[in-house]
Amino acid sequence: MKAVSLKQLAEHLGAELRGDGDVTVSSVAPLEKAAAGQVAFLSNPKLKQQLEVTQASAVILKADMADDYQGNALVLADPYVGFARTAQLLDTTPKAADSIHPSAIIDPSAKLGEGVAIGANVVIGANVVLGEKVQIGPGTVIGQDCIIGSESILWANVTLYHNVHMGQACIIHAGAVLGSDGFGYANERGKWIKIPQTGGVRIGNRVEIGSGTTVDRGALEHTEIHDGCIIDNQVQIAHNDIIGENTAIAGCTVLAGSVTIGRHCIIGGSCAISGHLTIADGVHLSGATNITNDVKEPGLYSSATVAMDNRLWRKNTVRFRQLDELFTRVRKLEKSVTPKE
């Protein structure tokens, strides 16, 4: 278990240390459950009373809250970011692989950088390039002509079809599928004619993709996920989608084909975005929002209705179907009562 002194931690975070710098900590914990040897954080003023009972060896908090705390404090303008960086420093997550397992099947043409680790039953195809310190978890399959940048991690049972390129320090979680065929078909008198999907997938640096997420390859050009994006579990990204830098997409969201999402967007869970649409930089979609037109300005957008009693929901559903009729009737009434000039 890794342990650091509060003095070392303060230097790592760029925090002001108030208290005993020789105290050591080895893990993080919630404020109300933290024990000796653990670090907690406080960013919500509503939880300030928990400072009176916490057993944490140190608390990361803002200066105005630290004035009332008698224990060891690490003072930062953004305690939550400090907590995240502390958790990274003290992380005990094991490696996806720590050596090249003898059961791995590696094509002779593949190029492996220094320090690459490959787990059991991995299959690596022709002309694959793995950068330095890449970790490949058990059961993962990497198709031909894939490139994986240095220090990237693929957890167990990830599948990369051919011609998938990703940058450095990416994390792909278990069961994700990158480069499967996009949903491209032509219809000839009721019969579906498959359109070969000959594009690839291009993923930037520091991208994280959650378990069970699928990223389809492009029909002709590439599907693109740019630097710093974070994509949750069970997300569907269709062919030729482009996702801008540092955008976050929460679980169970579905993107149809040829969607372009700007930079620094936040897409809530269970959203659905229709095909061939463009979403501007800085857009925030709350959960379960359906997008059927371009979003041209940054801001918060919502469309889902809240849960309600089923009987009321049934009544409102009927009324919703009557909205156009009601609107027409109201317009007629307005015209009938509008005084003539």
Image: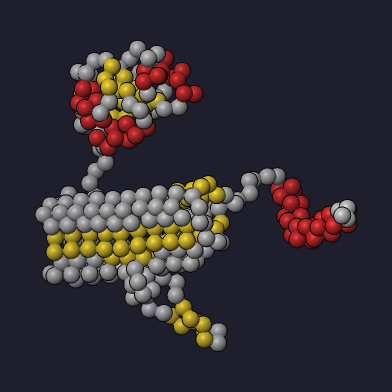
Residue 145 coordinates in the image, percent (x, y): 22, 69
- The residue sitting at the front extreme is 341
Residue at (55%, 58%) from the top-left corner? 291
Locate residue 92 relative to residue 29 in the image: left or right. left
Return the residue nearer the eye: 134 or 244.
Answer: 244
Residue at (53%, 46%) from the top-left corner? 300
Residue 11 coordinates in the image, percent (x, y): 21, 27
Return the residue nearer the eye: 121 or 111.
Answer: 111
Place residue 224 in its image quadrant.
bottom left
Place residue 137 in its image quadrant.
bottom left
Place residue 181 in its image quadrant.
bottom left
Locate residue 156 relative to residue 130 in the image: left or right. right
- The residue sitting at the bottom extreme is 189
Residue 127 coordinates in the image, percent (x, y): 18, 70
Return the residue nearer the eye: 39 or 326.
Answer: 326
In the image, residue 312 above or below residue 55: below
In the image, residue 21 above or below residue 300: above
Q: Is residue 291 visible?
A: yes
Q: How many marks?
A: 0
Residue at (29%, 57%) from the top-left corner? 204
Image quarter where the N terminus lies is top left
Q: Is residue 137 visible?
A: no
Image quarter where the C terminus lies is bottom right
Locate residue 329 relative to residue 88 in the image: left or right. right
Residue at (18%, 63%) from the top-left corner? 129
Residue 308 coordinates in the image, percent (x, y): 68, 45
